[in-house]
Amino acid sequence: MLQLIVASGATMDLNQLRCFTRVVQAGGFTRAADALGMPKSRVSRAVSTLEAGLGAKLLERTTRALSLTEIGREVLDRALAILSAVDDTERAVLDSRGVPRGTLRLTCGVEFGMIAVNGWIAEYLARWPEVRVEAEQTARLVDLVHEGFDLAVRIGPLEESRLAARRLGAIGYGLFASDGYLARHGTPRTPDALERHAHLAFSGGAQRAGWRLLADGASAVDVALRPRLRVDNIFALREAALAGLGIALLPLRLAAGAPSLRRVLPRWAPAPVPVHAVFPGNRWLSPKVRAFVDLSVARFDGAPAQTATGRRRRARTASEA
């Protein structure tokens, strides 16, 4: 095992650093042991040995919680940098072979995971037998570096940061209603006519205040919402539209799975929402990450890989949205 000598003359090995960082990332010894495939006692012993070698307490332990001490936060940052450098060296060797392998840790939103990412993961695993995937689908904003994730799929515009990003594509939206609703209430022919219809609204993001609709050669139109239903789940919104409760603004790829929904005002729609893969900008882009991102770009609109190459973008500095 590679040993590191610190200024005090104490030694530590990479296994101790990996155990310590994974305990912090996992929020406890039990989950860290599961993630590392090691007995809990061995993980606890490695962290205790690290603390003894440094002569400092890194973690405050109680029966219910685990937290970093002040020196523990500093050691964590330095440990992550050391392990990242070691991983980059290993990845450089693997990259020369060009074969994706190892565990890919990714995160994305729950709903977009169901709409698209789960399918990408299935194809990724089928194509590359030497990889494994750990996926966390959550609404929370994940700290990729400190929580040990390789990449995140994020929806919306990005801000500047030390993270790098690659554009996967954009989500198109449209207005939809069921055949039954349109038979009872008529089909609106202009955006102004939407005010006389029942609205089904998504409670998150930019759609909360209203719908801003655009059309080629026309000025933007803002539709104020007085929704019969406001819900924070896009699948529930689609079900409400299918039930004939009103007109909903839905992702095109989600509405495509419901043949009984009809597009309303097809010339009018909000601006597409960009989707990016983001990853730590100071890390070697390993074959396992590059392979997943390439597949995601190719499959974003359900197109064959050879027709999607024109949509690929160079990585750029960006933050998680």
Image (cartoon, helix red, strand yellow):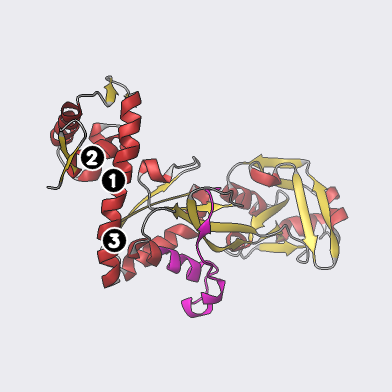
Q: Which residue is mark 1?
A: 82
Left or right of 37? Residue 181 is right
Q: Quadrant of residue 77?
A: top left
> Does 263 appear in magenta?
no
In this view of the protein, which residue sits in the foreground, 153 or 67?
A: 67
At 82% from the left and 58% from the top, the residue drawn is 186
Residue lying at the far bottom in this picture: please name it.
306
Between tags 1 and 3, which lies in front? Answer: 1
> Does 303 appear in magenta?
yes
x and y percentages locating residue 48 in the rendered image: 17, 28
Is there CB contact under 8 Å for labels 2 and 1? yes
Q: Amino acid at mark 1?
A: Ile
Left or right of 98? Residue 36 is left
The alpha-carbon separation of the residues under discs 3 and 2 comes to: 19 Å
Question: Is residue 91 among what the camera can see?
Answer: yes
The alpha-carbon separation of the residues under discs 1 and 3 comes to: 14 Å
Q: Look at the image and give the residue range highlighted in magenta.
A: 292-321
Q: Which residue is mark 3?
A: 91
In this view of the protein, which residue sits in the foreground, 226 or 127?
A: 127
Question: Is residue 68 among what the camera can see?
Answer: no
Give the label on residue 7, or none. none
* 106 is higher (above) or lower (below) than 5: below
Left or right of 283? Residue 194 is right
At 70% from the left and 52% from the top, the residue drawn is 248
x and y percentages locating residue 177 in the rendered image: 71, 57
SS at badge 2: helix
Q: Amino acid at mark 3?
A: Arg
* 218 is higher (above) or lower (below) than 78: below
Q: Amino acid at mark 2?
A: Leu
* 168 is higher (above) or lower (below) than 196: below
SS at badge 3: helix
x and y percentages locating residue 304 in the rendered image: 49, 77
